[in-house]
Amino acid sequence: MQRHTSWIAILTLAGACGGPGGGPKDAPDGFDRRALLTNEANNVILPIQSAFAAKAAALPGAIGAYCTALDANLGASPDAARAAWTEAMDAWQAGEAVLVGPAAMNKKTLRDKIYSWPLQSTCGIDRDTASRFADPASYNVATKLANVRSLFAIEYLLYTTNTDHMCAATPDGWDALGANLPRARCRLAAAIAQDVATEATALDTTWRPDGGNYAGELAGASSAQEAINQISDAMFYVDTMVKDMKLAEAAGIAMNACGVIGEPCLREVEHPFGDRATFAIRINLRVLREAFSGTTATTDGPGFDDFLTTLGHGDVADRMLGKLDAAIAAADALPDSFLAALANDLPKVIAAHAALRAFTDDLKSQFLTLLDLAIPDDVQGDND
Amino acid sequence: MFRATTTSWAVVAVLAGAAFAAPPQDKNAPAVPRDPKAPPPRAPAPAEAPPEVAQAPDVTAVSGDAPDDASPPSEEVIEITDAPPPGSKSSITRETLERNEFDDVHKVLGGTAGVYVRDEDGYGLRPNIGMRGAAADRSSKITLMEDGVLIAPAPYSAPAAYYTPLVTRMSRIDVTKGPAAIKFGPNTVGGAVDYIGEPFPARRAGYVDVGGGSDRYGKVHMRAAERFGKQLGLMGEVVKLRTDGFKQLDGGGDTGFDKNDVQLTAHYNSLPAATQYHTLDVRLGYGTERSNETYTGISDADFALQPQRRYMASQLDQMNWNHWRMRATHRLELGTNTRIETVAYRHRFHRKWGKVDGFIGQRDFYDLIEHPDAGANAIFYQILTGQADSSSPEEQLILGTNDRRFTSQGIQTTFTAERTTGSLAHQIDAGVRVHFDRADRRRFEDAYDMMAGSLVRTARPQALVLDSRAETIALAPYAQDTVRWKNLEVTGGLRVELIDYRFQNQMNLAVAGGNYAVVIPGGGVQYHATRDLTFLAGVHRGFVPVAPTAAAEVNPESSVSYEAGMRYRHARWSLDAIGFYSDYANLKGSCSLASGCTETQEGQEFNGGAARVWGAEAQFAAEPVLDRRRKVTLPLAAAYTLTQSEFLSDFDSEFAGWGRVKAGYELPYLPHHQLSVTTAVKTPRFELGAMARYRGESRDVAGEGDIATGVLAQALFTIDLTAHARLHDLAELYATCSNLLDEQVIISRRPYGARPNPPRMIALGYKARF
């Protein structure tokens, strides 16, 4: 404890007021913020939204075909439906990493309709499975909470093959499903897939220049700096969701729902049924790199690294890109099966977490400070 | 301070607040029948002094806190206070306290002009009191005292006052605003509230008050004092309060509280003939509370259906605290015009409040309850209300336990003297206080699943998320001189706060500290235009220290406050009308969970920049005699406060209640209008009283123009009734009905969600004294 031995003999009317810091600036510092916004909107985010809309549009048909096959043969293969879900899911994981605009608005209402994880209620899905099968007209996906719909529910319905329900008490009508359980699950999945496709199309439309033109709105925002802050907020997905939840909590690096440090916690794993967590992490990080660098497979525009470099912090930009590449490499080194990684290659998961943390440490400190950006509200309490 | 005789300068009866003026008295008659043991009387007041107005004879009233000045209940009693220096001082007298039988200090102070309260639990368990624009949050901007001693758990290191003395123990509550507040630092922006406990009686005395009422409300209050010879005495006091609470917990359960308080006072005084008259009171007190209170309010939609509802997830919420207070007070009367009072004190307060205040996946309960249907909030809302079970780790409820230990100790000396030099009469007040306080803050978090309406512990272990210590030592001298010349009084005073603070985060071993000094000047002028009419004006510096937990860039709250007005004291009625203007160089926001901040923000402070608050206060009191033969009187009292406020700069703040502020925005929880009107029909054996109060609407967050529904704290109009029937000279029955109209509105939205004022409540009681 620091000791103070003397009084400061300042006898003054302390009228000083330390006013809060000034607001964001479109400062004439030589960096074209509008160009960054245009590039991010048109070349990074918009293609992701469009790709997801296309994959989501294919999902109802694929699941519907599976349902039809089940009607004829309860032993029909779900592989095609699962493949369609995988493609849609991967496409959405790209969007998760830069969630800006309509999907991030209104407390991420639209995002949660498309993909609700980590909010999930398998018991609720089981209830809907039974009730919808008994009375299809009684089911309206629009009235359902996010944790019993979305791509998460479809995953659960397509990948669950046992006959167990996940509720404390047996849901009404569950026992009556009997052998029809796969059909009931498939029909519910199809209904939800239709909703996801609808939401995906709506989202893409809001972004497209021939639709809501949100991409244009973002690029032309009245405060370019604030608009850039929206994108940087979205980039913190890799900190709160990828680093902390997908890696740390699942691997037992941080405290989790299992209450044990040092051991994997399957309750915290993303895609526990489809086992796509490794792919999700890889996609998240690659898209983050695109957003950070402004560079995609087909374009090379201004990104945050250019922003830093223009302000005289090219060394920071290079260092962060290097750390991000190292994190991507660590994710690539994970087994494709994340469940297998937790069981057999935990050090690789820990290494991936450490590599990503090296990047997010810079993201939360120098990146924000040098670019005069605010940290997202939900990251304030981070004790890293 | 009470004195048992007229002073050499202005002597004013206690009229302000909700106090009632007295029926006409013979001004030439002796004011108080003196106790033979009391110290010798002071010099008579000069002719220019405003007339004294006597308190009506009242069986419930016993004279003030001067040593050994208690009078037998049947004797005529008068209450006299020091004439206030320029500024507003008012007292809620014993008569008023006992007439209304309020246990809630919010209600007690609600009839005082210039005081704002923000209701929270409906019982005033943890009051939110502000004055003249000073924010009400946990009374952290005012100076709270008991018998002149700082009583907040750690007034410098953790200004949020989670402890407040029991109103029922008090004989009087003094409210000081304006320049007079500089006598009572450290917080001088708004003013000071001083709970005055029972003075030691002159002879054997006893008191019993037993009551019961709505929601299984119960009160037992007993006090007994014995004298041993002429110089020694012992007094014990016990209080128990309880209720099952008026909130209705989903699924059932107790939402009330149990409070207990015991106090023992040993007393010594010199022989009455002594030329140097000493008294020594050693007081030891211990209080406890167990209250099933929550920070969680309800949504507007739920409020519309059932205002008293409490969500199922708050079923385990409970506050437990215990409070030790030790105090030794020595008074020395040197002749007739000089008094020295020295108090050594030590208070310890330990509280643990466990309450749900978040989900793993949604830490912002305020947002959740404000927008229960928005996005994923709909999921959390269903769990909060028990309509759905927790089904994923994100949906686990966090029950955060704020475990705090506070120590507050110090020694203070005040010196009061009256001297005359030529044609000038001086009233000199000076004092010094050395004070130390410490706040040890720990916070634990436990995770629960909502399962079939019950909270079930999860596998997630208890997490310690906060562990810190803040300490402050402060040296605070002050001096004030009031100089009287003919009809003019000029007062000048100076307070200095020398503050040394330190803070250590035990989680990461980060250390901070510093020291600074602040000079707080104040002064004013009173001009007694006539015997009845006085004009006054004053100016002083307002100051609130920075808590040790605040970031380095946070500045103390600082203002220059002005007031001007008039007082009229007639034998039959009185009127105070004072305008005030507080010019803030920096308004400071202090974060607590109670103010709506998140758990990670607690203890943080924020600059709000320049602001100004201005308004007017008016208080009127009278007691016309309806039937002199039957001694029927009609006491009347009214208090009105007009308040305007605005920030003077644009800024973004993380402080809950401010947000994105633009110049011109109003401060939160400052109603434009407050009005209280009290009346009664009083006879020697019966008294029927009624109190009507109106508090205007206010805003939950800074803003301008019409207040949006979602951030509206609604206007409230209530009527309270009281009835007292004297069985004989020593005992009476009483009945109270608060909120007669059963009006229920959203009185507050802090910490999380809409909160109601209490519904109609009825209580009956019996009290006796000897």
Image (cartoon, grey):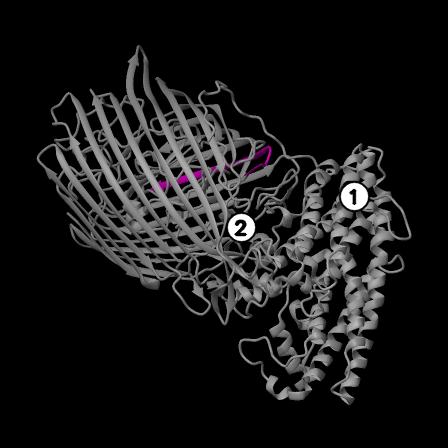
| Pick the front one: B494 or A107 | A107
Secondary structure of the residue carrying tag 2 is loop
- The subunit carrying tag 2 is B
Q: Magenta-highlighted stretch: main secondary structure? A: strand
Q: Are marks 1 and 2 on the same chain?
A: no
Tell me the magenta residue range.
Answer: B605-622
The answer to which quarter of the image holds residue A245 is bottom right
Query: Identity of the amino acid at label 1?
Result: Leu
Query: Identity of the amino acid at label 2?
Result: Glu
Return the residue found at the far right.
A298
State the mark number for residue B697.
2
Q: Nearer the viewer, mark 1 or mark 2?
A: 1
Q: Which residue is mark 1?
A: A321
Return the residue found at the far top.
B422
Return the residue found at the far left.
B229
Secondary structure of the residue carrying tag 1 is helix
